[in-house]
Amino acid sequence: MRLYNRPMPDTTPAGRAPVGLVALLAVALLINYADRGSISVAAPLLGKELGLSASEIGWVLGLFYWAYAPMQPIMGWCADRFGPARVLAAGFLLWSAATGLMGLASGLAALVALRLLMGTGEATFYPSALSLMSRNVPATQRARATATMQFGALIGPAAGALLGGWVMVRHGWRAMFVVMGIASLVWLLFWRKWMRSAPGAAPLPASGDDPPYALILKQRALWGGMIGTFCGNYAFYFVFSWLPLYLVNQRGLSVAQMTPMTSAFYIVDGASVLAAGWLLDRWVSRGASLNRAYKTALAASSAGVGLCLMTASIVSGPVAAAGILLLTAVLDGLNSPSNPSVTQTFAGPRATGRWMGLQNAVGNVAGMTAPVVTGYLVESSGNYTSALVLSGAVAICGLIGWLVVMPEVRPVDWAEQASRATHR
């Protein structure tokens, strides 16, 4: 079944991608992931001081996503309705404040409340950022611009692990949260300046082509993206949430040794993201279809990450374990430029916020479940073998979403879709 019967109008922006916007979004995403990942860096010391079990740590790690995931469609609607730049600024302020206040938390209840508040604030980022990208970045530069932005998501945990770990080792985990929360707020000064001068910051005027959520939900492409995103996210959030504890408890590293190894994973992943974005745009400019380029990268990432995680459950020795870990990072990097680019291609400037909100809501159910499920598996077995195998198997299932459910990657003609819905 095909969703489209005629050529789509060219609604993509012309010219070059705005460097300032892309750079600001990349830095914002760096801060986003550094702040949300700070809890996993602090977990070895925080868990001991507050007397938390492995399953309780799993809940603290995962509860962020219990607010982050369901708030995505709401924030997507807000971005399309009130302007993505404003919504992103408000969310940034909220999650930065929550990060700083975690340094004052006195127990499990306070940590849970602040993690939920942080999840609500960070839910603004992807719907708002991709809405801004779809308005301002030409299709031929989309993968590179998206990769540059996504690079922040990988450097963020690396920077958080290095800098946060440095502060934590010298001054404790509480000081780490306070410093990160206050430092994050500097970004808002630069964002405010950009908002004053950029026409793309304002809401788009109302149009009859604006699709409602009901019409977006009918798109087979959305459901394929949700399946693929959930499966890829499950594997990523397993690593994102539990890698520091895995390196300390399973591989025997000290906290001082763990932080550079954790950072190495994200640095390699980030380098892969940038290389993949450049190669995908180059491939498209030489004649490959968006469908072929993006789906090839997504399929390779799903299969490769899954197989690497399963292999990590059986390898022994530090060299083999490090090699598998870094190969996982390389293959994970193929997902980051292609997945958001697919969303922008299908949805277009008028629907990207809501489409991404829905897709990310389902995709981040993985963030709600992976840390918690891993906690119970580790607690019951005393090791990480079953958690690695499960995460790898889920990642491989992403092939169903990308290759079976998702149709050809090309823009949806929303006017035609609305007309079909009206005349049924």
Image: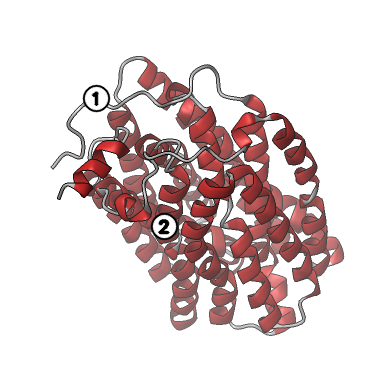
Q: Picture coordinates of residue 78 (x, y %)? A: 54, 53
Write down the quadrant of residue 169 in the picture: bottom right
Label 2 sits on a secondary structure element that is helix
In the rendered view, would you say 270 is above or below 233?
A: above
Q: Nearer the viewer, residue 74 or 209?
A: 209
**Which residue corresponds to the image point at 44% horizontal and 74% vertical from the top-left?**
373
Dot 1: within a 10 Å radius of its alpha carbon, few (fewer than 14), some, or many (20 or more) residues? few
Write down the quadrant of residue 297 in the picture: top left
Does residue 96 appear to the left or right of 170 in the view shown?
left
Please tell me the numbered disc located at residue 7.
1
Q: Picture coordinates of residue 89 (x, y %)? A: 68, 49
Q: Nearer the viewer, residue 369 or 216?
A: 216
Label 1 sits on a secondary structure element that is loop
Q: Return the residue found at the far top.
A: 286
Residue 274 in view here: no
| Residue at mark 2 | 363
Residue type pointed to by label 2:
Gly
Does residue 176 appear to the left or right of 354 in the view shown?
right
**Which residue corresponds to the image point at 44% horizontal and 41% vertical from the top-left?**
340
Instruction: Indicate which label's residue lies in the foreground, 2 or 1.
Output: 1
